[in-house]
Image: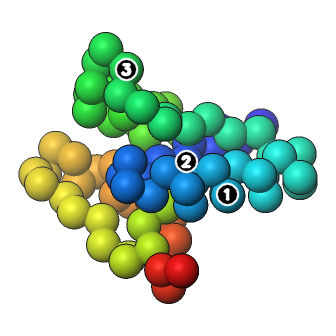
């Protein structure tokens, strides 16, 4: 089974929750971070590294990559480029 990780900025929490509803309706298993855990951004990056598919919810379509060490994660990232509501 593929591991799906859904993430995005906390300002897009409503959109992430809407996606969760759609995934649940279709019985798709996923993991998401709705708040920072004690590992902070490293915890998120570990989940990205462990996932088979990463879905970044970002209605504006921008995913910033801040260094080459993070760039390797971008190869498996899908970006939701939906227009803001």
85 or 66, nearer to the observer: 85
69 or 60, nearer to the observer: 60
Residue under label 2: 6
| The furthest residue to the right | 26
3 or 59, nearer to the observer: 59
1 or 14, nearer to the observer: 14
Q: State which tag comes first along the sequence, 2 or 3.
A: 2
Crowding around mark 2 (Cα neighbors within 10 Å: few <14, some 14 to 19, many 20+) is many
The C terminus: image quadrant: bottom right
Q: Classify residue 16 as left or right of residue 35.
A: right
Residue under label 3: 37
Residue under label 1: 19
- Of badges 1 and 2, nearer the viewer stands 1
Q: Is residue 52 visible?
A: no
Q: State which tag comes first along the sequence, 1 or 3.
A: 1
Q: Is residue 15 visible?
A: yes
Q: Distance between the residues labelled 1 and 2?
A: 9 Å
Figure colour scheme: rainbow
Residue drawn at (89%, 45%), measured in percent from left and top?
27
Residue 34 versus residue 28 in the image, above or below: above
Residue drawn at (89%, 54%), measured in percent from left and top?
26
């Amino acid at each position: 089974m593929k591991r799906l990780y859904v993430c995005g900025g906390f300002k897009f929490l409503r959109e992430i929750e809407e996606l969760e509803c759609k995934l649940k309706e279709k019985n798709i298993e996923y993991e998401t971070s709705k708040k920072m855990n004690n590992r902070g951004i490293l915890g998120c990056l570990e989940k990205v590294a462990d996932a088979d598919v990463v879905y970044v919810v970002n209605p504006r379509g921008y995913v910033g990559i801040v260094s080459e060490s993070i760039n390797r994660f971008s190869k498996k990232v899908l970006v939701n480029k939906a227009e803001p509501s």
